Image (cartoon, rainbow, N blue to C red):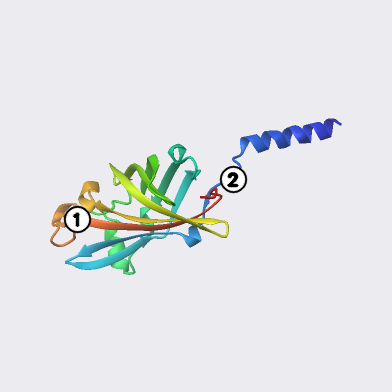
């Protein structure tokens, strides 16, 4: 009797302490990429390592929280010399600033399956307010969040020194993402 009661009490404690569905990022099916322009020519890159923590109920978006951490050393451009250059202090300054982060401050519905996620994007010690439009699609137990937005690289001191000249490297950088998630409630 004591064992049954203890097991029932433990099961009750665990079921109330854990969320009904743990939301997880499926990193192998997710991507964060960017496009910048150097002398008018598009340059595509991506980050190989990042993580997301979220608490999101599509029926209560105002209560949602979204946090993203990007390992800046995981940048991939397809050219080793360019990747080594981005690690330097004038660009990402990876030794001093190894991560970029995003922390939501609000989530608002923007139409069926669409949300505007406002928050602080911090790169290289500079934090700026951004609004990220997100489109959600669900299939087979997964939710895919996609979207894109533009940042101004100089707002984050990316490309200091001689690289501040926007005729060489454009100030606008388009960020694109596809985050595959499990555990999100039905839209």
Residue 96 visible in rendering: no
Q: Residues within 10 Å of mark 1 (few under 14, many from 20)?
A: many
Residue closer to the observer: 91 or 102: 102
Residue at 20% x, 50% y is 154
Q: Residues within 10 Å of mark 2 (few under 14, many from 20)?
A: few
Callout 1: helix, strand or loop?
loop
Real-space CA distance between mark 1 and mark 2, rounded to the nearest whole angstrom: 41 Å
Judging by the rendered image, the residue that carries numbered circle 1 is 171
Provide residue 142's location: percent of width, then percent of height: 54, 56
Image vertical order of residue 147 relative to residue 156, above or below:
below
Provide residue 124's location: percent of width, then percent of height: 29, 46
Callout 2: helix, strand or loop?
loop
Task: Give the residue at the far front of this rendering.
Answer: 112
Kindly report which numbered mark, 1 or 2, lies closer to the viewer in this rendering: 2
- In the picture provided, is 70 more to the left or to the right than 2? left
Residue at 67% x, 37% y is 14
Residue closer to the observer: 113 or 133: 113
- Tell me the quarter of the image containing the N terminus: top right
Quadrant of residue 106 within the rendered picture: top left
Q: Which disc, if any, is residue 106?
A: none
């Amino acid at each position: 009797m004591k064992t049954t009661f203890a097991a029932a009490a433990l099961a009750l404690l665990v079921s109330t302490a854990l969320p009904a569905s743990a939301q997880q990022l499926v990193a192998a099916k997710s991507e964060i990429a960017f496009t910048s322009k150097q002398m008018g020519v598009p340059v595509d890159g991506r980050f190989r390592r990042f993580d997301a923590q979220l608490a999101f109920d599509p029926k209560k978006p105002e209560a949602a929280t979204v946090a993203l951490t990007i390992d800046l050393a995981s940048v991939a451009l397809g050219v080793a010399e360019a990747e080594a250059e981005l690690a330097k202090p004038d660009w990402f300054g990876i030794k001093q600033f190894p991560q970029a982060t995003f922390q939501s401050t609000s989530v608002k519905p923007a139409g069926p399956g669409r949300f505007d996620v406002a928050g602080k994007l911090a790169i290289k010690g500079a934090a700026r307010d951004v609004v990220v439009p997100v489109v959600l699609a669900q299939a087979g137990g997964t939710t895919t969040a996609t979207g894109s937005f533009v940042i101004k690289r100089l707002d984050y001191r990316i490309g200091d020194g001689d690289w501040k000249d926007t005729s060489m490297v454009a100030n606008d950088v388009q960020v694109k993402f596809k985050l595959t998630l499990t555990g999100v409630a039905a839209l």
